[in-house]
């Protein structure tokens, strides 16, 4: 038996806007330099990936990515400084929740 903890953020309208999916998508954007490549690597439609990022940006009130349109020299996406800070805080919060949950799990179920 094991316990799993999922961290999901909801906006003021109780709509989910950030969790492991958008988190992994941002990491993939950082790795590939492209929203299209990142979405393909995750098996997501580009339109869905774009909506995930836009929904999170609207809820947070700042841009997570900076995008340049394609063309002759190609386009791309990068994580903004605010986006990097958000990822760092998300990771810290997620780890703290996992640690607290593991400790509580052991206290309750270790008998």
Image (cartoon, rainbow, N blue to C red):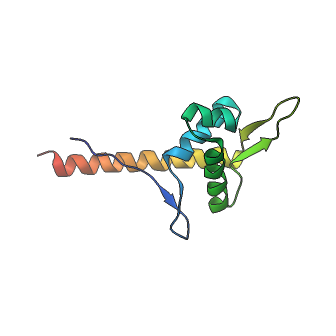
x and y percentages locating residue 62 in the rendered image:
70, 57
x and y percentages locating residue 32 in the rendered image:
67, 30
x and y percentages locating residue 89 in the rendered image:
55, 49
Quadrant, the N terminus: top left
Establish if 74 lies above or below 53: above
Q: Nearer the viewer, residue 2 or 21?
A: 21
The residue that appears at 62% across and 45% down in the rendered structure is 49
x and y percentages locating residue 59 in the rendered image:
62, 62
Q: Nearer the viewer, residue 83 or 96?
A: 83
The residue that appears at 62% across and 55% down in the rendered structure is 56
The residue that appears at 45% across and 48% down in the rendered structure is 94
Side of 76 relative to 3 (left or right): right
Establish if 53 lies above or below 16: above
Establish if 61 lies above or below 73: below
The residue that appears at 63% across and 59% down in the rendered structure is 60
Q: Nearer the viewer, residue 45 or 103?
A: 45
Side of 52 relative to 70 (left or right): left
The answer to which image quadrant residue 2 occupies is: top left
Taking the view exactly as shown, the residue that stands out farthest to the right is 72
The answer to which image quadrant residue 72 occupies is: top right
Taking the view exactly as shown, the residue that stands out farthest to the bottom is 13
């Amino acid at each position: 038996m094991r316990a799993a903890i999922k961290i999901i953020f909801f906006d003021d309208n109780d709509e989910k806007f950030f969790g492991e999916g958008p988190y992994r998508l941002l990491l993939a954007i950082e790795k590939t330099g492209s929203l299209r490549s990142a979405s393909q690597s995750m098996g997501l439609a580009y339109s869905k990936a774009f909506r995930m990022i836009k929904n999170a940006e609207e809820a947070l009130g700042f841009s997570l990515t900076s995008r340049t349109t394609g063309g002759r020299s190609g386009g791309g996406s990068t994580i903004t400084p605010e986006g990097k800070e958000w990822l760092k805080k998300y990771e810290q919060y997620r780890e703290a929740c996992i640690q607290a949950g593991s400790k509580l799990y052991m206290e309750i179920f270790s008998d």
